[in-house]
Amino acid sequence: MTVKAALSLPFAKYIVSKNNKWKNNAVKVQHDLLLSLVKQAKNTQFGKDHSFSEIANYPDWKNNVPVRDYEDLKGSVQEIIDGKENILWPGKPLYLCKTSGTTSGVKYIPISKESMPHHITAARDAILSYIAETKNTSIVNGKMIFLQGSPELTKTGDILTGRLSGIVAHHIPAYLTKNRLPSFETNCIADWETKVDAIVDETLPENMSLISGIPPWVQMYFEKLQDKTGKLIKDIFPKFDLFIYGGVNYEPYRKSFEKLIGKQVDGVELYPASEGFIAYQDSQKEEGMLLCVNHGIFYEFIPTDEFFNENPTRISLADVKVGVNYVIILNTDAGLWGYNIGDTIKFVSTNPYRIIVSGRIKHFTSAFGEHVIAEEVEKSLEKTIEKYTAQVNEFHVAPKVNPKNGLPYHEWLIEFESQPENLAVFTKMLDDELQNLNTYYKDLISGGILKPLQITTVPKNGFRNYMKSIGKLGGQNKVPRLANDRKIADKLTAF
């Protein structure tokens, strides 16, 4: 055992013990954090406009600060870009994180000197939680790769600007930099396919122990490694023991990964967002990710089935329930207030508070009133694959409202790695599973309003070619699992 490995376990245990203080007192920590955020920002323009100096508790907060999205925040961000200070948070942001919005075009999310460290600390603690629980210290001896966007930054106004992964790359702790790949030069390659090819060449001779990234792009990396060597990943990297991922549900990719790797590898799921680091998987034994309640974010929750009501229920962590789908609302130490990031989550535990990401509030299929959500399509596919062997690389669901013949239906565009023996039987099973999960959909089928779903097979690399065609290949980009229109579906059919 190396010195680094020997030291990593006691350090991991110390951090986990330290984190237990906020983990086991989450409601109080959140209450205190809200009052701290209000106090720090009371003299900002936003704080004055919303009477922060008069806020003493959560009911006061709800009365003074409405829920908003990026469109409501855009004017304040523009003032920051124009050089004004103390708009949303004291001073000026350390960075502006550039991200693509589905409705707002490019978004510029502020990251402050207070919020930046949380991105690093939470990712570090996820790895340390894994080490403390499993005692697997060997991962610190090998090389680690983080498939991410370019670390090159530009300026918006006079504020450094980049993608989240690129910004975070400038804050990696010194003790990790010697083990970390790819090199800065390779990481700066703009074209994703060229970049992955360079990463393959750079990592092939190395002893890789930890690999991290969004599943579809890690899969692309693995496939290129296999194409070049003709070997399984376990034979290329015998010490590869830990896969860290986030951004999309891993389950649809699991079988493809196991086939490419050739063995089962432990996984740790992360929930980082441009707006803040929200949660990480702290246990291999328990479901869900630990909510980061002590990381500069005060959370609020709105039940998804009420979100579009005029006066939806809006609650703090103290009142959440297990099993309910919530839209998650953030209030951060970078000046995002009552901010809806568009994600929906579900608590799987309240002791401690652990969550799963269930989808996006704007990503659903409800052309006929069925309101099918991402969690339902992912679970129905997962259950079908368990019963009827197949491997799926990627998929997208959209309504077919006016087909040439017969009733409307849901079209599933699926890129199979390994197609089921009988696609018709597989399709029937999938439809049955979806009906079991969504009673509205079941009623529409049984009532003769919809006919059962149909699968359109997408050729190998069809989704990648689509993403490349819209300039979103690689990085943190991903294809929405479902939509309420055919903008994506109609373009996918061309591939």
Image (spheres, rainbow, N blue to C red):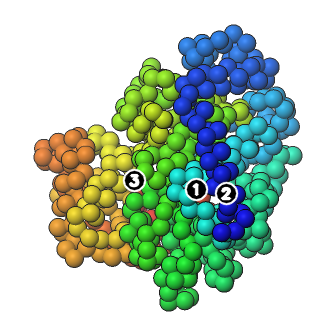
Residues packed near mark 2 inside 10 Å, few (<14), some (14 to 19) or many (20 plus): many
Q: In the figure, is residue 177 to the left or right of 262? A: right
Give whichever of 34, 449 is nearer the camera: 34
Find residue 40 and report its horizontal and vertical position in percent. Answer: 76, 24
Residues packed near mark 3 inside 10 Å, few (<14), some (14 to 19) or many (20 plus): many
C-alpha separation, residue under disc 2 versus residue under disc 3? 42 Å
C-alpha separation, residue under disc 2 versus residue under disc 1? 8 Å
Find residue 101 and report its horizontal and vertical position in percent. Answer: 59, 48
Find residue 80 and report its horizontal and vertical position in percent. Answer: 80, 36
- On screen, 308 above or below 422? above
Give whichever of 245, 238 is nearer the camera: 238
The answer to whether residue 202 is visible is: yes
| Residue holding disc 3 | 482
| Residue holding disc 2 | 8
Q: Which mark is residue 131?
A: 1
- Three-letter amino acid code of the residue under disc 2: Ser
Quarter holding the C terminus is bottom left
Q: Quadrant of residue 275?
A: top right
- On screen, 69 above or below 240? above
